[in-house]
Amino acid sequence: MACASRDLVVTLGTNAHTLLAGAPVDSVRRRLKLASILYDRVLLEDGTFRAQAGPGGSSAFRHATAVGESPSWQTAHQRSVVKGKTFGITAGLEPAPGVPAPTMTQVFASESVISWDATLEPFAAELPAECDWVHYFERPRRLPDDVGKLAKRWSTTDEHNAVLKDRFPAHFVCSRIVQDTNEDLALAAAAGVVLSADPLHNEVLSRRLQDDQGWRLEGFALPIIVPAVGDLPWDTVRDIRNDKAMGYLRAALRDIELAAMEAATSASDLRSAVHRTVEDELAKANEKRDELRSTIKRSLLGILIATGVGFATTALTGPLGVITVAGGSTALGTVIDAKAALRSKRSRAWVGALARVKSATVIT
C-alpha cells in the first residue's frame, strides 16, 4: 500500500460501524466524494470484515471476495437480529493438517453487543467512467512487526483511558474498537497516507490529537465552506478533479485548516474560525477589497454552516516517521503571507476552483 502522502485510505475496521445500508452508507459515500476532491487518490480496503464483541469476548475476521461473489452492505435488520444473541469461539487440535479436530473446546461465549459485517466493495459499481483515483487494496494478512508493535502500544494506552472506558464500559467491546482503530491508524501512518474513519472510531482517534504532538485533522474546511459538496454526483466530482487549479485549492485548504486550528478557541469555534480565515485569504487574493466583499458575500461566504458538519467528516494525519519516532514533534504552519498572496497565480487559481465547487453544488 505504499503511495504518496496526499492519498487517503478508508479501511474496514475503522468504518465498520457506519457501513450499514441506508443513511449510514450515505454518510460514507459523502466522505468518499469529499476525499475524491481533496486527495490525489482514495484507497479502499477490499474484502469483508466481520467483528463481534460483548462482555465475554470478541472476535474479528477478514476474508477476500471469491470469484462470482457480490458483497452487499449489512442491513439494520441483519445487525439487530444478531445483537443480544450468543456468539463464541471454539478450537481444537487437528491430528494432521486438513483433518478436522475430533474434539472442540469452547474458548469463550458471550452475548453480542456489536456485530458488524462491513464491506466497501459495493461502491465500485457506482463510480463514474474513467475513475482513475479510487483504488481497492488488499490488506496484509499480518501487520509488519514495527506497525503491530506501535498499534499495540497505542491500544494499551487507550484501553486505560477513562473517557473511552466510560464510553464503552464493556471491556471487550472497548478493546475491539480500540484495537481495530489503532491497527488501521498504524498501517496508514506507515504507508504515509491519511486515515478516514467513522464517528464511532473517531472517538479513539481523537486521543491521538491529545496525546501525541504532530497529529492533526484534515478535510474539514471544504464541507464547512460548501456544505453540499458531499452530495455532488460522481460525474461532477470527476469533472472537478480534472480542473488543473484543484491542486492550488487543496494546498490553500490545508493552509486554511492549519490557521483555523490555531485560531479556534474550542471545537465549537472551529467552523467560525474556518470562515474567518477564508474571508481573510479571499481578501488577500484581490487588492480591490471593497469590491471583493460583495463578491464574497454573494458567491462563497453567504452560506449557512451545516449543523451536521463536524469531526465525522474529517480525516487524521500524523507526523512523518511515526513508526521510528512515534509522536515526533511538528509545528503547525501558517497561511500564505499576505504580500506573497496578493495578485499571485496561486491565489487566483484556488479562489476560482473554490467558486467552481460552490457553483456545482448550486447547479445540482
Image (cartoon, rainbow, N blue to C red):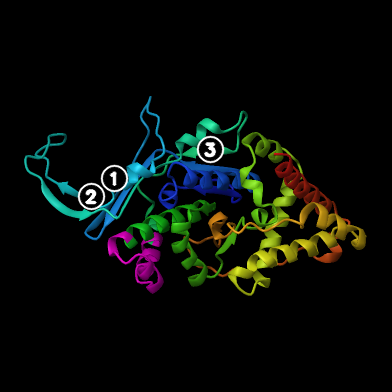
Can residue 317 be seen in the rendering of this structure? no
Type of amino acid at the residue the image marks with label 3? His
Q: Position of residue 357 (x, y in %)?
A: 73, 45
**Do tag 1 and tag 2 residues touch (Cβ < 8 Å)?**
yes
Type of amino acid at the residue the image marks with label 1? Val
- Please rate how many residues cluster around mark 2, counting C-alpha atoms within 10 Å: few if below 14, some from 14 to 19, many from 20: few
Q: Position of residue 314 (x, y in %)?
A: 57, 56
Magenta stretch, overall SS: helix
Which residue position is annotated with label 2? 85
Which label sits in the foreground, 3 or 2? 2
- Please rate how many residues cluster around mark 3, counting C-alpha atoms within 10 Å: few if below 14, some from 14 to 19, many from 20: some
Which residue position is annotated with label 1? 81
Q: Secondary structure at mark 2?
A: loop
Can residue 104 be seen in the rendering of this structure? yes
- Please rate how many residues cluster around mark 1, counting C-alpha atoms within 10 Å: few if below 14, some from 14 to 19, many from 20: few
Which label sits in the foreground, 3 or 1? 1
Q: Residue furthest top?
A: 68
Image point (82%, 57%), residue name:
296
Image point (60%, 69%), residue name:
268
Magenta stretch holds residue 10: no
Q: Secondary structure at mark 3?
A: strand
What are the residue bounds of the magenta stretch? Answer: 150-173
Q: Earlier in the sequence, mark 3 or mark 1?
A: 1
Q: CA distance from mark 1 to mark 2?
A: 8 Å
Horizontally, is 331 left or right of 16 in the view?
right
Q: Say above or below: 138 vs 281.
A: above
Q: Position of residue 147 (x, y in %)?
A: 41, 56
Which residue position is annotated with label 3? 135
Q: Say above or below: 9 vs 181.
A: above
Q: CA distance from mark 3 to mark 2?
A: 36 Å
